Image (cartoon, rainbow, N blue to C red):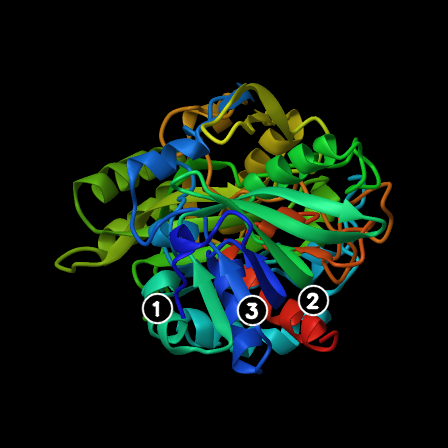
Amino acid sequence: MFLEPKTFPSDHVESAQICVFGSGPAGLTLAQDLARRGVSVLLVEAGGLYFEDWSQQLYAGSVVGDAYYDLAEARLRMFGGTSNHWGGRCIPLDSYDFEPHPGFPETGWPISKGDLDPYLAGACEVVEITNDFKVEQYTENVVKNTFQYSAPVLFGEKYMEFCESSDALKVCLETALIDLEPEGDAIRHATVRTRDGETWRIQADNFVMCLGGIENSRMLLWFDEQHGGALNANRDVLGAYWMEHPHANLADVVFRETGEGFFKDGEATFALTREAQVSAGILNAGLQMTEAAYGSGSKQLIADLLCVAPGLGARILKSTQGKALVCGSRLESHWEQAPVRTNRVALGDETDALGIPRPQLHWRRSEQDRLTATMSTLIFAQDLAQADLGRARLAEWIAEDGAIPNGGMIAGWHHMGGTRMHDSPSHGVVDKNLKVHKLQNLYIGGSSVFPTGGYANPTLTIVQMSLRLADHLATLV
């Protein structure tokens, strides 16, 4: 049921077994799953039912380093969270995304893919996709994989009826978390503020912050500072190891042939094998082909190909006579960024309307990030040529060994890290059950807990982890 917090008196205290802050994919998945089990849940969302400028401006912040998106536009402060501009692209993390990467310190998760696999079918049901992720060997060093596309599910719309009718789930909108007050090794209560400026408190057995990949770090940094370091065991790691998925165009590709089913929904997707990544000293990258029908663009590619590979070019040219074949494709990539402490969420000098410091995002792409993109492209292009499957015309910045371009799509709007998961509080903020190391009843959900990001779009994994967290919290009540 939806509550009316603006009617609460200033000394009001609302109680629940579990209090969840944030109604994006992490928070709503967790809240509704627990409520269906009969657990009393209070879900608190800072934004309103719909997008409003007054609310969105509370997400403004600054960026230090490389060009990045306006932080007030890179996430949404409303019911359903950032799922309201989610593209719906889904694939699970690879098994080796969870493992330590040779040559890359601070990689590896304290859980394995096997710990999340039991929640894949349920996560696919949540985002309304088929649990069918094929992986096939394509060349010696390359696999061809399959993404699934959600409608996309808008989580606020999906769970609106349940939120309205459930007796176990209480929802408060336009209610911002402004403080978590610790007592010993637990959170005693939370303080929240309504849009009208009224404050009241929440008591719960357990609290879960699902505020997003920037806000989780920002708010925990602020609360920890307000309470003299009582909320976090290692302030140096809080907010650190923030990651994105850098994006760039890599090449134009012409194939010798692309049989039926090669493209799915207009794309074909690939990745290097784990062995190829380790041998090249790079991280994981998704290589995406966008289908292009035979036409002027493809004709120019074939003309170029005739100059560098006359035999293959002639065969392709002959095969296209009188046919509408698919043979030209744009190769793009979104790839894994190495976790480094200097990429981090910090508190800025300016404050928002609630008196809380705005986030200051420190983000730079490294030489290693550039190498992951360029080496993935070169290995793919070499394998394509050696197997006589086609040829790639490299993007200028790769051919000239240049910098990653800033134009076009810079990154994926995928905010990961900052409150990373690790067995040790010296290297992470939460443990393998997503509990903050220093406290007994504070948990964090969402992609801010990712130690590494692979190349997979994070929403499906976020939902898997929320279902796993629901199982854990249900055992505590």
* Rendered view: 281 above or below 145: above
The residue that label 3 is drawn on is 41
Judge the density around disc 2: few (<14), some (14-19), many (≥20) Cα neighbours within 10 Å.
Answer: some
From the viewer's perspective, tell me whether residue 200 is left or right of residue 425: left
Q: Secondary structure at mark 2?
A: helix
> Foreground mark, 3 or 1?
3
Give residue 424's position: percent from left, percent from top: 87, 48
Q: Nearer the viewer, residue 151 or 1?
A: 1
232 vs 201, left or right, is right
Is 70 situated left or right of 465 in this image?
A: left
Q: Quadrant of the N terminus?
A: bottom left
Numbered badge on residue 12: none
Read off the residue under disc 1.
160
Packing grade of label 1 (10 A; few <14, some 14-19, many >=20) is some
Q: Secondary structure at mark 1?
A: helix
The amino acid type found where label 2 is placed reads Lys
What distance separates the C-alpha of mark 3 from that of mark 2? Answer: 28 Å
Q: Position of residue 182 (x, y in %)?
A: 76, 46
Residue at the spot of label 2: 113
